[in-house]
Image: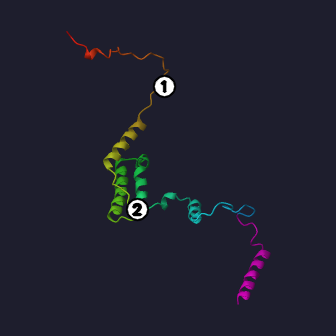
Amino acid sequence: MTDAWEAAVEAQIRGAVQRGEFDDLPGMGKPIPGRGAPYDESWWIKSFLEREALPSDLLLPTPLQLRRRVEQVPDEVRDLPTEQSVRDFVAQLNAQIVAWLRNPEGPRVAVRPVNADEVVRQWRTGRARRELPTPATEPVTATAPARRPRRAWWLPWRRRG
C-alpha cells in the first residue's frame, strides 16, 4: 500500500516538474535562511513576528505589557490635540490596568493606574515648550559675568568685641 502511495506522489511531482511549476519560486538560488546557525526553539515565532511586522511586546505577559505602556504614556500623549483626548487615553489605559488588577494573570508585577492629572500637567508643559516662539538669533557678544564679592570663610565666626 505504501509503495502505491509513494508512486502516486512521485508521479505528481514528476508531472509538476515537467509542467514547470517549480520554476521561478521565491528564494530560488538563495541560501536557506538560518542555515548554519544554532537551533532556536522559537524560530517560528520570531519569523512570524518579523514577517507580519508585529512588535515583540506581544510576547510579554499582560502585567509587563501594561508596565511598558505606562512607561510610554508621555510619548504616546505628546501629539494628542486636546486635554480631553489625553484624559480619554489615560482613562482607557487605567481601565485595562484595573481589569488586570481584578483578575491578575501571569507574574505578580506591581502595576498601578496612571494619575491623569499628572499626565495632563506634563502634556501641558511639553506643549507650552513646543509652542514658545523662538527668539531671533542675535550675535552673542562675549561679556564677562558679573562677579559677586567673595566673603571670607572666617567672617561669621569672628568675635565682635
- Which quarter of the picture shows residue 97? bottom left
User: In the structure shown, which secondary structural element does the residue marked by tag 2 occupy?
Assistant: loop
Between circles 1 and 2, the one closer to the viewer is 2
Q: Position of residue 38 (x, y in %)?
A: 64, 61
The residue sitting at 48% across, 60% down in the picture is 58
| The label number, if any, that marks residue 107 in the structure image | 2
Considering the image in quadrants, where does the N terminus appear? Answer: bottom right
In this orientation, which residue lies closer to the viewer: 93 or 35? Answer: 35
- Which quarter of the picture shows residue 25? bottom right
Which residue is tagged 1?
137
Q: Position of residue 130 (x, y in %)?
A: 43, 38
Residue 76 drawn above or below residue 16: above
Considering the image in quadrants, where does the C terminus appear? Answer: top left
The residue sitting at 73% across, 84% down in the picture is 6
Q: Position of residue 111 (x, y in %)?
A: 36, 56
Q: CA distance from mark 1 to mark 2?
A: 54 Å
- The residue positioned farthest toward the left in the image shown: 161
- Which quarter of the picture shows residue 12? bottom right
Q: Which residues are magenta?
A: 1-26
In this orientation, which residue lies closer to the viewer: 55 or 91? Answer: 55
In this orientation, which residue lies closer to the viewer: 115 or 148? Answer: 148
